[in-house]
């Protein structure tokens, strides 16, 4: 007997918003950059509306509102009574954990080290340097060496002077050790994956980050022990994931109790997809307006950083997707597993880079580039998933109509 799906069944045809999503995304990126250039004061004011932790902005209030309306409709569609069944399927869970924590951080380090430290080093500037914060709690005299850097005095403050390419590498590392726990729900939804499995992995990755983020970061950065940004992690996970999850669960229960399951499925659910897509587009306008000046002022720098991040994303996606096929997973589990591996929790990465290295550091810029390429690349991967559904066995519990 087939198991129940973790998500309420509904027609899966692409709507107007989804069919031309790439076009809307490109228009919103352009609109955001133009807004940031023409009205930088407005963009800065919105960007300043944030909840901070340890002196670093962790939660952007406008982005948090947009993410709520992106994720809330997905949470409403999930039948939480059966999510536990998705967690009992150990193979996709084990695959996702293996790729996210045993593979992805190390491939990010190796790929970015090759591109930034070897291939693009001359373009970045072999002698170019960056001034970053000293590691927290460390007080060294001016002129002292620490790792690959030297302590210097800049405007009365002690800073660590490091090669610029190494600063970019540090930001990439922070992206590589932060698996996505928010927007991946949108990518899995658009790819017609098993939303129950995605939600289970979001919960597991959120908990795993609390233990492994600092450990892997300190090991790969090689700058001493990386303090775990506990408050940043808890705030980010709570606001970006927990709030819409609880709201979706309570809303579903209330509507089903008040109007019935049929009304919920036939009259309510189909109105939610445009809400998710609309919130995604507004989020893009905001994100790119915040960073419009950075994009226009550093086009080649952004390119040097974006190329290894793109290579890393594609490698992890195809590795996970290929392993899922070899393991005989259904498409419903394979697609979100690959999406989770490919995407990054750039909010936490940016907050950590600012906290550890400073707002104007190359590390912070590298995490921002992660934002710039995340949406276009993940939408490309969504399209790839939808076109390759027949590569995977059909199973009644996770199969997609029309696959």
Image: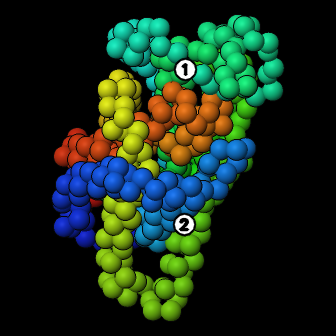
In this rendering, is residue 318 above or below 47? above
Q: Which of these two is toward me, 239 or 263?
A: 239
Badge 1 crowding class, 10 Å Cα cut-off, few under 14, some 14 to 19, many 20 or more, is many
Side of 224 relative to 129 (left or right) = right
Side of 179 relative to 226 (left or right) = left
Labelled disc at residue 244: 2
State the SS at label 2: helix
Which quadrant holds residue 81?
bottom right
Q: How is the image coloured?
A: rainbow
Label 2 with label 1: CB-CB less than 8 Å: no
Residue 91, given in percent of the width and then of the height, sits at: 47, 40
Residue at image x 37%, y 82%? 268
Q: Which residue is mark 1?
A: 130
Labelled disc at residue 95: none
Q: Which of these two is toward me, 349 or 167?
A: 167
* Outermost residue to the bottom: 258
Quarter the C terminus occupies: bottom left
Tally of numbered tags: 2
Badge 2 crowding class, 10 Å Cα cut-off, few under 14, some 14 to 19, many 20 or more, is many
Which quadrant holds residue 5?
bottom left
Task: Look at discs 2 and 1 and give the one toward the viewer.
Answer: 1
Residue at image x 37%, y 26%? 301
Dot 2 or dot 1: first in sequence order is 1
Quarter the N terminus occupies: bottom left
For the question of whether residue 314 can be seen, the reply is no
Residue 373, given in percent of the width and then of the height, sits at: 35, 39
Residue 303, given in percent of the width and then of the height, sits at: 32, 28
Residue at image x 23%, y 65%? 17
For the question of whether residue 368 can be seen, the reply is yes
């Amino acid at each position: 007997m087939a198991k129940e799906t973790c998500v309420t069944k509904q027609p899966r045809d692409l709507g107007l918003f989804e069919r031309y999503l790439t076009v809307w995304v490109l228009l919103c990126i352009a609109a955001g950059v133009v807004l940031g250039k023409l009205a930088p004061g407005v963009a800065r004011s919105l960007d300043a509306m944030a909840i901070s932790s340890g002196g670093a902005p962790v939660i952007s209030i406008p982005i948090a509102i947009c993410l709520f309306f992106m994720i809330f409709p997905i949470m409403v569609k999930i039948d939480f009574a059966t999510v536990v069944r998705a967690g009992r399927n150990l193979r996709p869970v084990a695959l996702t954990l293996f790729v996210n924590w045993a593979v992805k951080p190390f491939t990010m380090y190796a790929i970015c080290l090759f591109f930034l430290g070897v291939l693009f080093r001359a373009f970045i500037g072999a002698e170019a340097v960056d001034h970053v914060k000293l590691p927290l709690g460390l007080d060294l005299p001016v002129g002292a060496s620490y790792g690959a850097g030297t302590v210097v005095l800049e405007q009365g403050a002690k800073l660590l002077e490091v090669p610029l390419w190494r600063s970019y590498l540090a930001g990439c590392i922070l992206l590589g050790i932060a698996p996505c726990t928010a927007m991946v729900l949108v990518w899995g939804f658009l790819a017609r994956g098993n939303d129950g499995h995605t939600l289970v992995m979001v919960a597991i990755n959120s908990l795993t980050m609390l233990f492994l983020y600092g450990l892997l970061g300190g090991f790969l950065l090689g700058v001493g022990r990386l303090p775990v940004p506990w408050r940043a992690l808890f705030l980010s996970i709570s606001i970006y994931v927990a709030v819409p999850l609880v709201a979706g669960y309570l809303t579903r229960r209330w509507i089903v109790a008040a109007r019935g399951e049929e009304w919920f499925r036939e009259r309510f659910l189909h109105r939610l997809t445009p809400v998710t897509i609309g919130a995604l587009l507004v989020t893009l306008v905001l994100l790119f307006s915040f960073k419009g000046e950075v994009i226009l002022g550093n086009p080649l720098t952004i390119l040097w950083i974006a190329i290894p991040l793109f290579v890393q994303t594609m490698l992890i996606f195809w590795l996970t997707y290929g392993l899922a096929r070899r393991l005989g997973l259904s498409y419903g589990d394979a697609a979100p597993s690959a999406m989770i591996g490919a995407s990054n929790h750039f909010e936490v990465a940016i907050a950590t880079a600012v906290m550890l290295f400073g707002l104007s550091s190359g590390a912070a810029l590298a995490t921002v580039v992660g934002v710039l390429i995340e949406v276009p690349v993940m939408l490309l991967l969504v399209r790839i998933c939808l076109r390759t559904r027949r590569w995977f066995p059909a199973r009644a519990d996770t199969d997609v109509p029309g696959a």
